[in-house]
Amino acid sequence: GLPEDHFQLVPIRLPSLLAGFASIILIWRILHWFGYRCAALFAAFFLAVHPTAIDFHVQARGYSLSMLFELIAIASIYLALRTLKWRY
């Protein structure tokens, strides 16, 4: 078997990577809802190729998850105010 101090990096870093992918999609969606279609494409592209964002998305830290939860909060507030339903 593997030594006791050996661990797999993929399962540790996968949640952060998936949160990074979800953040790219969500920032595009939020700006699209606001009516900024060109800015939505630019922001999604910029988040996808920016070296610091890529570094955050592959680290096993909470940066990507924090970004994702902030975008989820913004989307929830926007939907709640737009529909006047607080279920979001």
Image (tube, rainbow, N blue to C red):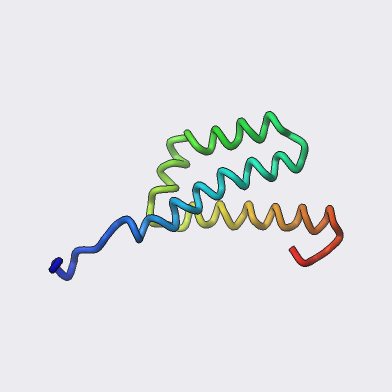
Q: Using residue 59 as the reference point, say whether residue 72 is left or right of it.
A: right
- Residue 26 horizontal/vertical position (percent): 62, 47
Q: Using residue 37 as the reference point, say whether residue 44 is left or right of it.
A: left
- Residue 17 horizontal/vertical position (percent): 44, 51
User: Image quarter for residue 46?
Assistant: top right
Look at 40% across and 56% down and name the residue there.
14
Asked if 33 appears above or below 78 in the picture, the reply is above
Q: Quadrant of the N terminus?
A: bottom left
- Residue 71 horizontal/vertical position (percent): 63, 52
Q: How many marks?
A: 0
Q: Quadrant of the C terminus?
A: bottom right
Asked if 3 appears above or below 47 in the picture, the reply is below
Look at 29% across and 57% down and name the residue there.
9
Look at 53% across and 38% down and name the residue there.
47
Residue farthest right in this picture: 84
Closer to the camera in the image, 64 or 2: 2
Look at 63% across and 44% down and name the residue there.
27
- Residue 66 horizontal/vertical position (percent): 54, 56
